[in-house]
Image: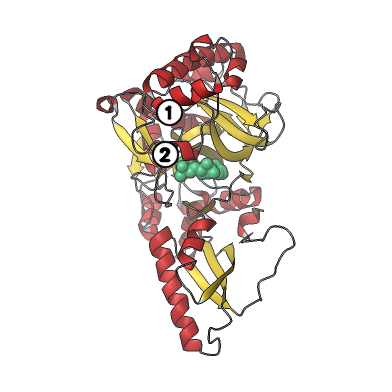
Amino acid sequence: MSRTQEILHAPHEQIEEIQLEGIKKTVIACYENVPFYKRSFDEAGFDPYALSSLEDLRRAPFVTKQDLRDNYPYKMFATPLSKVKEIHMSSGTTGVATVGGYTEHDLETWGECFARGIIYANGSEKDIVHVCYGYGLFTGGLGAHYGGLWMDSTVIPMSAGNTERQIRVLKEMGSTIICCTPSYAMHIADTAIEMGLDPARDFHLRAGIHGAEPFSDNFRRDLERKLNYHVLDVYGLTETMGPGVAIECWEQQGLHLAEDHFYAEIIDPNTGEVLPDGEWGELVLTSVDREASPVVRYRTRDITRIIPGTCPCGRTHRRIDRIHGRTDDMLIIRGVNVFPSQIEDVMKTFPQVSSWYQIEIDTDQRSLDLVTLKAEVNPDFDFDSVAAIERLQQEISARLKTALSVGVRVRLVEPKTIARSEGKAKRIVDLRRGIK
Ligand code: DLL
């Protein structure tokens, strides 16, 4: 604990030394143990043994999600499987998931990184940490769980779902910190209100550590008002560890990167050039000390910037801004990653519908994501038969549910009723929480 407090306040030069020493070892471990890295470093003319400054890392090639997929399941591991104690996978439902392995050391680091969120929430062993991120292959549940254990707090491993039970536990067990997606926190709050409770008074929450999906400032304020607590944004991704890569402190002025474990660069997503602090671009992450699944210059596709200057909290780890979107078209619906191409793939199997469609995402009165697929039928489809329309809508919806693990309402419309655009087609209309 005191070591973590110390490192969170260490002079930045000291953090850079830790990063350089760690990355020197990481690039060599990758080169010597992962055939993919050997090939890609050699092709790019990057000599891992010659790395002598953090700037030198710019000569290393990027690694993408596709590279990780191509090496499914274990080919990106830099340690023997016998040293890997746990495995998690991305929620990507596109067939090939990305896999993260954790050695004993990696699990310890993960717990410590998430625990920083509890530290930022002024937490201690006295806190009762209510974890309702999903447990399992998703990194949310166990990441928060290990964070609570690392802090010596009391952990309630609820996992997601069974909202009425969550509410009972929140009220009766006195949970002080809740960890779940922001949309699920809102759903819990709204359901409690519907049940006649006043969660601001009946719950005992001080803080929520919410992430895995974007949420606006208005949404945050609404949550804070309903639950009478303080919301901290937590960022992370399966490919680099899970939640805890960066977390907001109490000041809510950006997310402190866990810089002693991750080296961050912001690049222009089109040219790959590294951008100066303050400029928005794509976040690229390199592992400083990950053993089982290290990444060197992983392109996250997430858009953010390094916030210049120091945080009023006095901690020295640089901050990233809240995630503004992604460079690809991945949607996050109720925490599940969905690509429009997956929806297209399902639609292609129905000859009655054309390729003109629009996906509208909104929130229902319970603040849960609501997805409507508007799809044009082909001109030869009998649009006068209400029964036929309803039947087809149901069939498509059921198929989408199986393929995506997300409920999608299907609304068939007549040919040529979806607006055409002169440029790119506007496939996605996202009306959620002020996200553009
Ligand atoms: O969502 C890990 C996580 C769990 C983070 C719990 C925070 C809390 P994946 O399923 O691999 O991992 O999805 C990673 O989710 O690349 C971002 O696009 C998005 N994302 C994660 N955190 C945030 C956040 C987990 N705080 C992808 N704000 C990432 C916005 C986020 N987007």
Q: Position of residue 315 (x, y in %)?
A: 59, 22
Q: Is residue 310 above or below residue 415?
A: above
Whether the residue carrying mark 1 lies under 8 Å from ligand 1 is answered with: no
Q: Is residue 230 visible?
A: no
Q: Is residue 163 visible?
A: yes
Q: Are marks 2 and 1 in contact (CB under 8 Å)?
A: yes
Residue extending furthest right? 422
Q: Position of residue 276 (x, y in %)?
A: 71, 26
Q: Is residue 412 left or right of residue 240?
A: right
Residue 65: mark in rendering: none
Q: Is residue 310 above or below residue 53?
A: below
Characterize the local packing of mark 2: few (<14), some (14-19) or many (20 or more) Cα atoms within 10 angstroms: some
Q: Is residue 353 above or below residue 51?
A: below
Q: Residue at x 66, y 76 (%)?
A: 417
Q: Quadrant of residue 152?
A: top left
The residues bearing labels 2 and 1 have C-alpha atoms spaced at a distance of 10 Å
Can you identify the residue that label 1 sits on? 36
Residue extending furthest bottom? 384
Q: Which amino acid is tagged 1?
A: Phe
Q: State how the image is colored.
A: secondary structure
Q: Nearer the viewer, residue 249 or 422?
A: 422
Q: Quadrant of residue 319?
A: top right
Instruction: Answer with mark 2 or mark 1, whichever residue precedes in sequence.
Output: 1
Residue 70: mark in rendering: 2
Q: Residue at x 70, y 68 (%)?
A: 420
Q: Residue at x 46, y 78 (%)?
A: 392
